[in-house]
Image (cartoon, grey):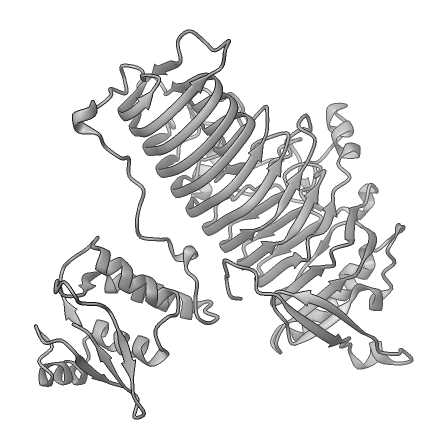
Amino acid sequence: MELVTSMSMVLVLVPLILGAEARKGRVLESFEYTAMSCRGHTASITDFGGSGDGKTSNTKAFQDAVNHLSQYASDGGAQLYVPAGQWLTGSFSLTSHFTLYLHKDAVLLASQDMNEWPVLKALPSYGRGRDAAGGRFASLIFGTNLTDVIVTGANGTIDGQGAFWWQSFHKGKLKYTRPYLIEFMYSDNIQISNVTLLNSPSWNVHPVYSSNILVQGITIIAPITSPNTDGINPDSCTNIRIEDSYIVSGDDCIAVKSGWDEYGISFGMPTKQLVIRRLTCISPYSAAIALGSEMSGGIQDVRAQDITAIHTESGVRIKTARGRGGFVKDIYVKGMTLHTMKWVFWMTGTYKAHADNHYDPNALPVIQGINYRDVVADNVSMAARLEGIEGDPFTQICISNVTIGMAPKAKKVPWTCTDVDGITSGVSPRPCELLPDQGPEKLKACDFPAEPLSIDQVLRRNLIGWKFEQWSNLMSTISIFSLSKVSNDGLIWKGNEVGVYSVSSCVKVCSLGSEDVHFWKNIMRRGLVPPRVESFMWQVVLQKLAVKTELVKRGVLGIEDVLCPL
């Protein structure tokens, strides 16, 4: 599956492809639709008895369709098309190398019959359900141990019909935790894009114990008073990208998690390498981005940029407590625009909820390396509420270039700080004494890494599994290569009819962090160099003797226009 940052739409005329048994006595149809990518085999839910009348249960039809199409996993994969209509269904599970595609007027309606929702064991990193001590209902769209799965469409809708579940939750009638709309466990290369999620019974999107996740261009809407309707919750995952999405919810728009108390500590799987960008959030009682509170496996290397929050309780919130253990570190937030907030920044070390009474109160979380910069906010009640843990302060906090316009009835003291340590620069109103301002002569921009994460690459071709790992290793290794410092030098690849490429100044120097290095790596990761040139770079990085000999022949050191035969 290729991760892309812009939608590439094509018009497809696809015959329905079914197995021999399924085709007997059936007239094949064809249908037109715009699709982001094409699998080798495609079918419609109607060919498995599906009915879009909004009343007939389609749980069996969806599962039969997925089960049938799974036979094509090793033969180009399969795509299940959901046409216009209202498709009532309970939980169903997807398969690998599979696309679920929703027509713009297709609506998946979540069944209110609990018999159509299998009960799963509690997540091992949580030890229990969130709503009850027992297990949990499977999500509407579910998958475990999968690879290369896409849930997408022309902005079709998945409606959780959550009011039924919210009422049962408030009345204490649930024996199991409410279902989510989409959940993938122990999976890799997952994409969720161009769909609208409405009225989830609980969390909307929950990738857990998974890697290489792209969530792009989705809309999530739930009443602002609906319980626990978090938007997107990456949980013990690696390499996640969330972008270009709009969320209105009754809880955190994005909540980053990694397990709960002693269960999360024991499971020990952090969430790391997360990119969040171009997010719009409305959540009057919660945060645009929350880190925790279930963070016992650790959270590291989160990069958020271009975030807009309106009528939201806080911009960024870190939630933890004694007994959580774990860590939240290397957090980078840049470019937030906030309107009508209770707090811009909120950190709390006294979050009360625990999985059970067996947590270790001496398991203290490590909160460090928190960087916020380039923030504009208005109509704010209080600039920040930063409360660490006594004897376990939150450290290495940096806040820079922040302008906060206070509301007419704002708190008289805009900052409250306890058990925190760090610096500020160019922040208004003036921060608390525990975060001293560096003054105009020492203006400092808080860190935001220039090097993108591996999930943030736009690849020329499909790279998954070991190929992706090998390519990522190349990107890391060539950090020690840069161009020469000749003022008119540039990285220019020229090819001729015999396949010889000319490279300007292929010189190995230690120059980490230079603009030249970033430029070189960026054009390679974006697929702007020919494959043969990339192959040559592999040889240079691996320092093959034959290549070294060729470079010496051509006087690589200090000589421009080095020939690189491939």
Tell me where residue 546 sits by quadrant. bottom left
**Residue 158 appears left or right of 295:** right
Work out whether residue 495 or residue 225 is closer to the camera in this orientation and state it.
Answer: 495
What residue sits 57% from the left and 59% below the top? 145
**Residue 533 appears left or right of 222:** left
Q: Can residue 427 be seen in this view?
A: yes
Considering only vertical position in the picture, is 84 above or below 125? below
Work out whether residue 288 or residue 393 is closer to the camera in this orientation and state it.
Answer: 288
Q: How many marks?
A: 0
Tell me where residue 364 sits by quadrant. top left
Name the quadrant of the C terminus.
bottom left
Residue placed furthest toward the bottom:
498
Give how far across and how far down residue 143 sits, in percent: 63, 55
Give how far across and how far down residue 434 sits, in percent: 27, 17
Q: Is residue 126 visible?
A: no
Considering only vertical position in the picture, is 211 above or below 33? above
Residue placed furthest toward the front:
488
Considering only vertical position in the picture, is 275 above or below 74? above
What residue sits 54% from the left and 54% below the top? 186
Give how far across and how far down residue 71 sits, in percent: 68, 74
Give how far across and how far down residue 9 sits, in percent: 61, 65
What residue sits 40% from the left and 43% below the top? 303
**Residue 514 appears left or right of 71:** left
